[in-house]
Image (cartoon, rainbow, N blue to C red):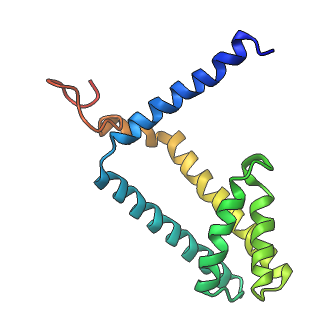
Amino acid sequence: MPTTADRSLPAALLARLQAVIGVLRGIGETDLLLALLLSIAFQLIDIVVVQTIGRGLAIDLGLPTLLVTMPLVYLATVLPLSPGGLGVREGTMALVLAQSGVSSSAAALVALTVFLNRVLVGAVGGLAHLAGGSRLADASGGGQRNPPAGGRPGD
């Protein structure tokens, strides 16, 4: 027999879900379209980066192959199999590229180099933030989109 706490959990989840749906309904179609276009642009940039890394390693990765491979890698990465998708991302990339005619060792090399690239880029961003990059957000109003009525951004 369920306890009172067990019965209130679905109600609490339902209330949170309804609140999220309410917020999502408040987002305009233009904002959603912009978010979609930016997402597609960033994914395409990432695919070009992977292709560039492949070229740097003298491994021919065709753009059509990567247009199929990388979305599968992204999907596999979000599966809760390991912390941060570590190993899952590289294994998926190696497997899919190997199916596309790239040797297993070359596919693994590309996957690990892409991972190393992402770690290094993230480290540079983290160091820039620690070195005072957060002052840019403060100077621009702390990321607030709409200033409070009668005040300046950041008040």
- Residue 72, located in which quarter of the rendered image? bottom right
Q: Closest to the observer: 15 or 121?
A: 15
Q: Residue furthest top?
A: 4
- Compared to 22, does 65 lie above or below? below
Q: Closest to the observer: 65 or 33?
A: 33
In the rendered image, which quarter contains the C terminus?
Answer: top left
Instruction: Give the percent coordinates (x, y) of residue 123.
Output: 62, 51
Instruction: Give the percent coordinates (x, y) of residue 110.
Output: 74, 75
Q: Closest to the observer: 16 or 56?
A: 16
Any part of residue 135 in sight: no
- Compared to 86, does 107 lie above or below? below
Is residue 16 rendered to the left or right of residue 101? left
Instruction: Give the percent coordinates (x, y) of residue 89.
Output: 74, 62
Is residue 53 rendered to the left or right of residue 31? right
Q: Residue furthest left?
A: 150
In the rendered image, which quarter contains the N terminus?
Answer: top right
- Residue 47, located in which quarter of the rendered image? bottom right
Is residue 28 rendered to the left or right of residue 119? left
Q: Residue at x 72, y 49 (%)?
A: 84
Any part of residue 105 in sight: yes
Count of marks, rendered view: 0
Instruction: Give the percent coordinates (x, y) of residue 56.
Output: 66, 82
Q: Residue at x 71, y 88 (%)?
A: 58
- Residue 64, located in which quarter of the rendered image? bottom right
Q: Residue at x 65, y 85 (%)?
A: 55
Q: Residue furthest front?
A: 1
- Compared to 48, does 127 lie above or below? above
